[in-house]
Image: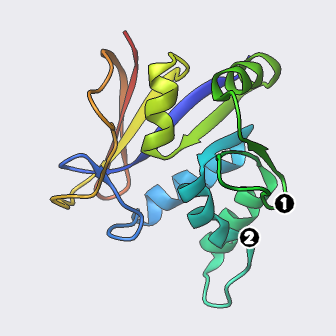
Amino acid sequence: MARIVFGMNVSLDGYVDHDRFAPGVELFRHWIEQVGGLTGSLYGRRLYELMSYWEEDDPEWGDDHRVFAAAWRKQHKWVVSRTLTSVGPNATLINDDVEAAVRRLKAEQPGEIDVGGPVLAKTLTDLGLIDEYRLYYRPVVLGNGAPFFVGSPPPLRLVAHERFGEDAVRLTYVPG
């Protein structure tokens, strides 16, 4: 049975934004390992389109970027969208009954499935489908943007904390 996990880099004031701050070297290497060990990822349309950047090699990438891209391409992706009509390689479109589709994934897949994006995470939180939340705090204050928790966070219980690299801390919570 798969575990559904929502984890992202978060500013100190609770926002997620891949364009406004990036992980340090050690945290990026953690993300490479994380992505390489996943059964797959669940994406909403916007984040899937953003992450599709990794489908094509960029000559300016360093070794870590190439390794991350290979890991991302290898994993399966499920894309929740009512507007897309097709998705790229190694991806499946979910365009109706998200709850049934995710419950089926949980029942049929092993390992961990990552949730990409706070809007999709809110939907899955409201349905009681997220098993774990991982907040990777970085010492950045954005002041606005997309919040990690859309709306009020669910009742959570801290189960772990860990430092990553020079300036990141992961707090791991489960519902409850």
Q: Residue furthest bottom?
A: 59
- Residue 45 location (% of width, % of height): 60, 54
The answer to which image quadrant residue 41 occupies is top right
- Residue 169 location (% of width, % of height): 31, 44
Q: How is the image coloured?
A: rainbow
Residue contact at pointers 1 and 2, CB within 8 angstroms: yes
* Kind of residue at disc 2: Glu
* Residue 40 - label: none
Instruction: Tell me: residue 82, above or below residue 67.
Output: above
**One can see residue 148 in this view:** yes
Q: Residues within 10 Å of mark 2 (few under 14, many from 20)?
A: few
**One can see residue 38 in this view:** no
Mark 2, secondary structure of its residue: helix
Instruction: Tell me: residue 157, above or below residue 92.
Output: above
The residue tagged 2 is: 55
Q: Residue furthest top?
A: 176
Q: Residues within 10 Å of mark 1 (few under 14, many from 20)?
A: few
Count of marks overlaid on the render: 2
* Residue 89 - label: 1
Q: Is residue 26 left or right of residue 1?
A: left
Q: Which residue corresponds to the image point at 20% horizontal and 49% vertical from the top-left?
A: 12
Q: Is residue 109 left or right of residue 119?
A: right
Question: Which one is in front, 130 or 58?
Answer: 130
Q: Quadrant of the C terminus?
A: top left
Q: Which residue corresponds to the image point at 71% horizontal and 20% vertical from the top-left?
A: 100
